Amino acid sequence: MVSLDGILEKRVEQQTMSLINWHRNTQLIQYADLLRGLKRDFGLDLTEEQVSHTIVTIESLWQLLAEKLNEEMVVLLPLLNNSQLEELFVSINKKNDKFYKENVDLDKDEIAEEFKERLLDNFESWLGDLTKQQKNEIQKTATMIYSSAHLRLKLRKYWQENIQEILKAEDTIEVKSDQLNIFFNQFNVERINILADIRNKNIQAIGLLTVKLIHIATPDQKQHFTNKADDYIQIFTELKENR
């Protein structure tokens, strides 16, 4: 966390509310529509292509949100003073160290175990109790998923080094904002390209797994999914309407 003075704190609050309102107005209804589609397609007719399309759509929504966050950072980061910048980069270093320990400094078996636990948690959340056959399918898929953690750590450090250089330069706020905007746009393209190969392989693996699990889903699991999807659809709809 970075210590903010009163004026800057108010500016952050205003920018945050603007981002929240944008998210509610533009994205929540799209998430609700995706859930309605998954409810409709839940069953033996579900295909890998449908699941992959859903995953790609969700990622595109995340990417749009990241771009909006970048727009806010372009405005706010140049307003930080030297002391606040020091706090910011100390915090980023700590988060990168934690990311390394939890995601990069793992052997092959530890990575597979981590993916297995994540998949189990995710599918149990949406389907309820899993059958032995479903758990076995998850176990097999976990060994086929590729980790991009080492690449993402490099990207995190590259991002940090560049914004640190921009923000510590003796330039005006306007110049820093322009340079940040250029860098963020370039970085987003580079990030997508660097992670594309692993991302595509993992989407294929998870898409196939999802289809297998849903094709052998029990009636109770289908009901569990329907109930949870309905809950989220209601939440997203109410949040949009009550913005």
Image (cartoon, rainbow, N blue to C red):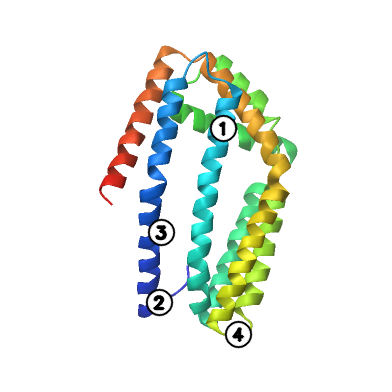
Secondary structure type for disc 2: helix
Q: Earlier in the sequence, mark 3 or mark 2?
A: 2
Tag 2: amino acid: Leu
Residue at left 55%, top 74%? 177
**Local secondary structure at mark 1:** helix
Q: Which mark is residue 171?
A: 4
Residue underneath mark 1: 53
Q: Earlier in the sequence, mark 2 or mark 1?
A: 2
Which mark, residue 8? 2
Task: Give the residue number, with chain letter if any, for mark 3.
Answer: 19
Circle 1 crowding by C-alpha within 10 Å: few under 14, some 14–19, many from 20? few
Amino acid at the residue labelled 1:
His
Alpha carbon distance from label 4 to label 3? 27 Å
104 lies left or right of 2: right
State which quadrant residue 31 falls in. Answer: top left
User: 66 and 143: which one is in front?
Assistant: 66
Q: CA distance from mark 4 to mark 1?
A: 44 Å
Q: Are marks 2 and 4 in contact (CB under 8 Å)?
A: no
Kind of residue indicated by mark 3? Leu
Nearer the camera: disc 2 or disc 4 = 4
Amino acid type at image mark 4: Asp
Give the Cα separation between the discs numbered 3 and 2.
Answer: 16 Å
> Is residue 104 at least partly visible in the picture?
no
Q: Quadrant of residue 88?
A: bottom right
Callout 2 environment at 10 Å: few (<14), some (14 to 19), or many (20+)? some
Above-or-below relation of 77 to 26: below
In the rendered structure, the answer to whether residue 137 lies left or right of residue 45 reads right
User: How far separated are the C-alphas under marks 2 and 1?
Assistant: 41 Å
| Mark 3 residue crowding within 10 angstroms, few (<14) / some (14–19) / many (20+) | some
